[in-house]
Amino acid sequence: MTHIAIVVGSLREQSFNRRLARALVKLAPSSVTFSWPDIGNLPLYDQDDDEDQADPVKTFKAAIQAADAVVFVTPEYNRSIPGVLKNAIDHASRPYGKSAWRGKPAGILGVSPGILGTALAQQHLRNVLSVLDMPTMSQPEAYVRWDEGLLVQVEENDEVLREDSAAFLRNWLARFLEFVAQVQAGRAVK
């Protein structure tokens, strides 16, 4: 079993990225489980709190530590990642030397109605993840462009990806799971 934490960089319940993440989970094989660590209730990061982190921070860090890997699904705000996502990343990386991110394989997805998708946000996120010592899958990249036909509603609160998008993301997820296995095998060898 592989356990993946899905960290969505948007707080809006019906955000495009949250909807994409939910649809992605449906494509996963039964050997994969998911958790959805909450970033919306984290206080603003303040280094003065490192030695006595708030309960929501401890809960968030524990969820990341319990995962085998992390998939970030992020919108692009002003050509970068949302502040709420950076806040969550900072919390889980602290205090110094006690990062929950270290060594966790990471994958990055994003969807946006803009023509560039989330390319710049993803590049900024890759820079941050490299400092956190998170091996991050580089290929295939997934800059998904939002349109109203991307997701197909099957029931009231249940959407699935359009078949061409499902095939693309099914391949992305398969490659990510291979990447996670390679990272874990490399870690076991050391």
Image (spheres, rainbow, N blue to C red):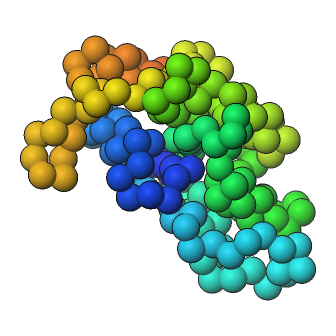
- Using the rendered image of the protein, determine whether residue 96 is visible from the camera's viewpoint: yes
Instruction: Please name the residue shown 77% across and 59% down the image.
Output: 90
Q: Splitting the image into 4 quarters, where does residue 134 fall?
A: top right
Left or right for 30, reference 63: left
Left or right for 163, reference 109: left
The number of callouts visible is 0
Name the foreground residue: 10 vs 6: 10
Q: Splitting the image into 4 quarters, where does residue 107 fall?
A: top right
Q: Measured from the top left, where is residue 168 in percent x and y?
A: 37, 17
Name the foreground residue: 66 vs 55: 55
Q: Measured from the top left, where is residue 190 in percent x and y?
A: 77, 35
Left or right for 180, reference 96: left
Instruction: Please name the residue shown 56% across and 50% down the image.
Output: 9
Vertical position of residue 119 compared to residue 37: above or below: above
- Using the rendered image of the protein, determine whether residue 89 is visible from the camera's viewpoint: no
Q: Measured from the top left, where is residue 21 in percent x and y?
A: 40, 42
Could you tell me which quadrant the N terminus lies in? top left
Instruction: Please name the residue shown 78% across and 70% down the image.
Output: 45
Q: Measured from the top left, where is residue 117 in percent x and y?
A: 54, 25
Name the foreground residue: 51 vs 91: 91
Vertical position of residue 155 compared to residue 119: above or below: below
Vertical position of residue 141 compared to residue 72: above or below: above
Instruction: Please name the residue shown 83% across and 80% down the image.
Output: 49
